[in-house]
Image (cartoon, rainbow, N blue to C red):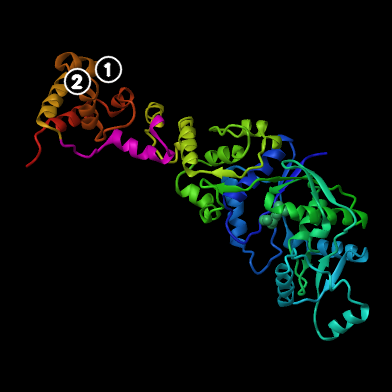
Amino acid sequence: MTTITRFAPSPTGRLHVGNIRTALHNWLLARKAGGTFLLRIDDTDAARSREEYVAAIRNDLAWLGLTPDGEERQSERLAKYEAAFEALKAAGRIYPAYETAQELELKRKIQLGRGLPPIYDRASLALSEGERAAKEAEGIAPHWRFKLDHDEAIRWEDGVRGAQKFDPAQLSDPVIRRADGSWLYMLPSAVDDLDMGVTDVLRGEDHVSNTAVQIQMFTALIAAQYTAAHMPRFAHEALLVGREGKLSKRLGSLGCDAFRDQGFEPMAIVSLLARLGTSQPVEPFVKVRPLIETFDLSTFGRAPAKFDEAELARLNAQIVHQLPLEAVQGFVPADFTPEAWHAIRPNLEKASEVVEWWQVVTGPIPAQDFSDEDRAYLAQALAALEWSETPWQTLTASLKAATGRKGKELFLPLRRALTGMDHGPDMKELLPLIGEAEAQARLEQGAKPPRS
Ligand code: GLU
């Protein structure tokens, strides 16, 4: 059976790093198996769903390289949900409920006050035909609940959490449809997973109890001959938390926009999120292939995965240090050479910083203040500058012999005069890029007394 996974965001906001991680893992799972990765837009909530978020979700996935093999929209599938609803109703698995939100809240409070779990008491299920008719005659439109089968424990073998067992009597019969006919998440998702032949449902562990309910829905839909499809496998990954170990607000708002604005490489995010929370090491990958090949749910841990922006920054730098020149072509002018990229690349944390270092090569550079002693030294350097294949080595060797300077004393005034900076790329590689005439001019400038 071909593996089919899906990523099912609700377009009610931007994707955040937690959603991105779920999308990535579903993509990796499908790619590793040579299967299909679907994007399912969960837009049954017409009031909160927005087209701009649908577009943003597509863009974010494209930017990360997580292209879906197909896209489905729940808002276009309402007839399917209606058919499933009718099938389950005919099978006695759906019943109307008449409580108002306030009544339900009161019931909850009373249960909690008595130290009982706030499980729906099925009062509406107990209504007689006559009582129901009376409610309807009063003009109360029902909402609809799925009737859980209390006879047997719900069990599944979770791809991350291992053997799972739920007592259905400890769960409320879920509301699946509102009084206005609109759908809540639970049933449409189960219907789609069956209709789309989803083989693996991989999502956050906040969905574990939904899975228990949905397993009964899958079973009921198959039993009601709504479909001949099979129940998918399930895996629930531990949630993503901030470095301090909490579900921070910041993580909830951190998404591709922020990553792009901060100049992070998509592969830095992919490299980090692919392995975070697993027993495999987080490593900088420029290409995604090795991450596909090594993707393995059995390496996923049960403890929350800690997302650390400093780790992302480190990984980003390590990735930039491996990027080919083509990857930065958008930032640099046409005369930017492979030698320049080779010299500058090891110094970058973000690819965009290449612009600043290229400016150091081409100039102008900021003027520096030197002591009298260093000015004399720079004058000496100017006189000693001899252009060759290796001008830096020649220059520093002759200055070392002539002045007895070494280490920082020998190198730093030269670097400052030649680049306007006290740190940066290897001068052996940088000086040939700066060129003879410009190097002379910069040393001359450095040797000049300060303007008073
Ligand atoms: N739209 C749901 C969510 O964003 C999908 C959950 C699922 O993967 O089934 O939480």
Residue 166, position as x, y percentages in the image: 80, 52
Number of marks drawn = 2
| Residue at image location 79% in from the left, 63% down from the top | 172
Q: Is residue 421 visible?
A: yes
| Residue at image location 57% in from the left, 56% down from the top | 14
- Residue under circle 2? 385
Report the front residue among 368 and 134.
134
Specify few, some or many for label 1: CA neighbours under 10 Å numbering under 14, 14-19, or 20 or more: some
Q: In the figure, 341 relative to 124: above or below?
A: above
Task: Indicate the quadrant where residue 340 lies.
Answer: top left
Is label 1 in a helix, a strand or a loop? helix
Q: Going from the N terminus, do you reach mark 2 or mark 1 first?
A: 2
397 relative to 123 in the view: left or right: left
Q: In the figure, 35 relative to 247: above or below?
A: above
Which of the two discs, 2 and 1, sits closer to the camera?
A: 1
Q: Which mark is residue 4?
A: none
Is label 2 in a helix, a strand or a loop? loop
* Magenta extent: 346-369
Residue 175, position as x, y percentages in the image: 78, 66
Residue 29, position as x, y percentages in the image: 70, 39
Q: Residue furthest bottom?
A: 138
290 relative to 78 in the view: left or right: left
- Residue under circle 1? 393
Inspect the image, locate mark 1, and give the three-letter code of the amino acid beneath it: Gln
Report the front residue among 60 and 84.
84
Q: Is residue 155 magenta?
A: no
| Residue at image location 75% in from the left, 39% down from the top | 35
Q: CA distance from mark 2 to mark 1?
A: 10 Å
Inspect the image, locate mark 2, and give the three-letter code of the amino acid beneath it: Leu
